[in-house]
Image (spheres, rainbow, N blue to C red):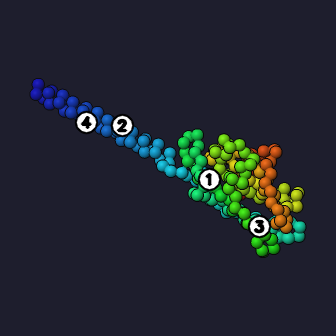
Amino acid sequence: MKHNLFYATACAALLGLSLTACGGTQTENKGQTAESVKSIRPDGPIESNPASTREFSTHLVGQHYVITIKRQADKSLPTIKSDGGIEFYDNRVDVSITRDGREFFSQSYTKEAFLDFIKADEAALYVLLGMAWDENETAAKGKIVLMGQVGVPGVEEGPSFSIEIASDGSTSSIVKKQYQETGAIEHTTEDLGV
């Protein structure tokens, strides 16, 4: 009888320990889950795109041009908040072009350069996604042509633009593309890293 009572007490103690251990494990898992969720949602703004610098070389009107396009997050610009509540830094793109080894053009672009072409409520959700050199348009128009795109961070879609720079550097203009080839521009900007 004492022997059975001993086994019953030992089993009850082991059962209690296992239940406590299970409860402890669940509490630890809840803590890990909360930590995982916290790591998914950052505490502050994050970069909408990685920084990049690309260089391209072309001949136009008998002269050699080197186009350098540098994209980076600009923490001095207002941040953009996504529908999911994540804040993103906007980008700045610096373009410099040399002609036959001498500086020909230098300009810094932010989303602000494109605000005349987009609605205010859309602009509040957009960042400057990037810019790329448009080799085909440069050859067709006899001037340096860049592509620019603004859009929702992470989605990588939005209106695209042509930035046309005269071959003598005297003028530059921004034109909204009538036919929005988001797939092509997205592909090109991804390839170029800008």
Decide: few, some or many residues near mark 2? Use Cα within 10 Å; few <14, some 14-19, many ≥20.
few
Pointer 4: what residue?
17
Pointer 2: what residue?
26
Query: What's the distance in space between the residues labelled 2 and 1, CA to CA?
Result: 41 Å
Which tag, 2 or 4, sits closer to the chain's start? 4
**Which secondary structure lies at badge 4?**
helix
> Relative to residue 133, is residue 61 drawn left or right?
right
The amino acid type found where label 4 is placed reads Leu
Look at the image and tell me whether residue 55 can be seen: no
**Image quadrant containing the C terminus:** bottom right
Query: What's the distance in space between the residues labelled 3 and 1, CA to CA?
Result: 23 Å
Pointer 3: what residue?
105
The amino acid type found where label 2 is placed reads Gln
Pointer 1: what residue?
90
Q: In this rendering, which labeled residue sits more in front, label 2 or label 4?
A: 2
Decide: few, some or many residues near mark 3? Use Cα within 10 Å; few <14, some 14-19, many ≥20.
some
**Which secondary structure lies at badge 1?**
strand
Which tag, 3 or 4, sits closer to the chain's start? 4
The answer to whether 80 is drawn above or below residue 103 in the figure is above
Of 134 and 191, nearer the camera is 134
Residue shown at 43% from the left, 41% from the top: 33
Decide: few, some or many residues near mark 4? Use Cα within 10 Å; few <14, some 14-19, many ≥20.
few
Q: Position of residue 19 (x, y in %)?
A: 29, 33
The amino acid type found where label 1 is placed reads Asp
